[in-house]
Image: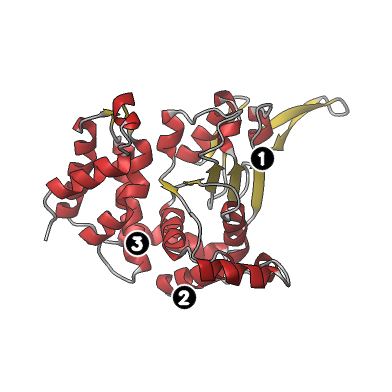
């Protein structure tokens, strides 16, 4: 089955459940295929949890959800070794991180210590427990959510954690007619109940493995690096994007090209995906933040100054 057909099947399945979010679904699947993880930052009720469930059902993948709370411990995520007095041995009980699609719901409600339990898993697809390295599933994808307006009882995500997310997306509210359509469908049953697998995990793994075959020219690489380096010297930016951002941007543009049925990356792919890939990695000084200027504004100005390769 051609890769763009696999993508379209998953996309159509998700769009049946998540109305009016075609752009966000496309970007999320680009991160998914490229091996990155996604932070969904939006107000409650916009479909963040539903999107994660629908993706898991669409590819017949294992799915687990962790509700992050202030009393959550790292062992609640990774697992724990329990002593069995019968055979006088410790046996390891896997935590929810050992799955294909992990929903880290309201991740900023857990302490930094607990948040950090996901760092190794997200960066290296493995966890170190009791001096043993335990590999995660070959298909492993984290969708984390956080509420940007309710700060009571929350812990801001540290820079190292933010940098592990390939992309930050905001779903937002849908148009009037689409919201009416949602009401009509929910009147009978939740659309998620009708979602069945349209592809399998092996199809998705093949797509992930074929991403590297998408050509990206030296000119596009220089374009990406020039943008990322410019964020490090931009006015009002304390800490710019890291080389990890360059790698994430390259891989997600390759995924977009594959989704479009193309054999090479274009500057349009870079410009389409750069804000959700890079903006959340920038740390702005207080004067800039209080003036109302955002990381997206700074990146937009950078794009205007860097020549686009032709």
Q: Which mark is residue 256?
A: 3
Q: Nearer the viewer, mark 2 or mark 3?
A: 3
Q: Which residue is mark 1?
A: 67
Crowd around label 1: few <14 · some 14–19 · many ≥20 (10 Å): few
Q: Which residue is mark 2?
A: 1
Q: What element does badge 2 sit on? A: loop
Residue 214 percent location from the top left of the image: 29, 61
Callout 2–callout 1 Cβ contact below 8 Å: no
Residue 61 percent location from the top left of the image: 62, 58
Q: CA distance from mark 2 to mark 3?
A: 18 Å
Q: CA distance from mark 1 to mark 3?
A: 31 Å
User: Looking at this view, is 230 or 76 the one in front?
Assistant: 230
The residue at the point 41 percent across, 72 percent down is: 4
| Mark positioned earlier in the residue sequence (1 or 3) | 1
Crowd around label 2: few <14 · some 14–19 · many ≥20 (10 Å): few
| Mark positioned earlier in the residue sequence (2 or 1) | 2
Farthest right residue in view: 86
Q: Which mark is residue 296?
A: none
């Amino acid at each position: 089955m051609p890769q763009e057909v696999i993508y379209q099947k998953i996309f159509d399945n998700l769009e049946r459940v998540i109305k009016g979010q075609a752009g966000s679904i496309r970007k999320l699947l680009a991160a998914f295929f490229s091996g990155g993880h996604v932070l969904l930052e939006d107000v409650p009720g916009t479909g963040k949890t539903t999107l994660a469930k629908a993706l898991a059902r669409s590819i017949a993948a294992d799915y687990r959800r962790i509700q992050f709370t202030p009393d959550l411990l790292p062992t609640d995520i990774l697992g724990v070794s329990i002593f069995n007095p019968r055979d006088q041995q410790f046996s390891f009980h896997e935590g929810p991180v050992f799955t294909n699609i992990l929903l880290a719901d309201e991740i900023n409600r857990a302490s930094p210590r607990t948040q950090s339990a996901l760092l190794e898993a997200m960066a290296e697809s493995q966890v170190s427990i009791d001096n043993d390295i335990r590999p995660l599933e070959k298909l492993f994808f984290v969708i984390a959510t956080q509420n940007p307006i309710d700060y009571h009882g929350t812990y801001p995500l540290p820079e190292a954690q933010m940098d592990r997310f390939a992309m930050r997306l905001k779903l937002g509210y849908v148009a009037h007619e689409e919201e009416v359509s949602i009401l009509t469908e929910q009147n009978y049953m939740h659309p998620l109940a009708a979602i069945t697998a349209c592809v399998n995990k092996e199809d998705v793994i093949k797509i992930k493995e074929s991403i590297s075959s998408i050509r990206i020219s030296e000119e596009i690489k220089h374009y990406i690096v020039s943008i990322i380096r410019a964020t490090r010297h931009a006015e009002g930016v304390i800490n710019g994007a890291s080389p990890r951002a360059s790698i994430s941007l390259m891989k997600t543009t390759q995924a977009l090209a594959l989704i479009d049925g193309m054999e090479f990356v274009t500057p349009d792919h870079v410009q389409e995906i750069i804000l959700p890939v890079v903006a959340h990695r920038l740390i702005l000084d207080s004067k800039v933040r209080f003036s109302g200027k955002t990381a997206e504004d700074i990146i937009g100005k950078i794009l205007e100054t860097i020549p686009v390769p032709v």
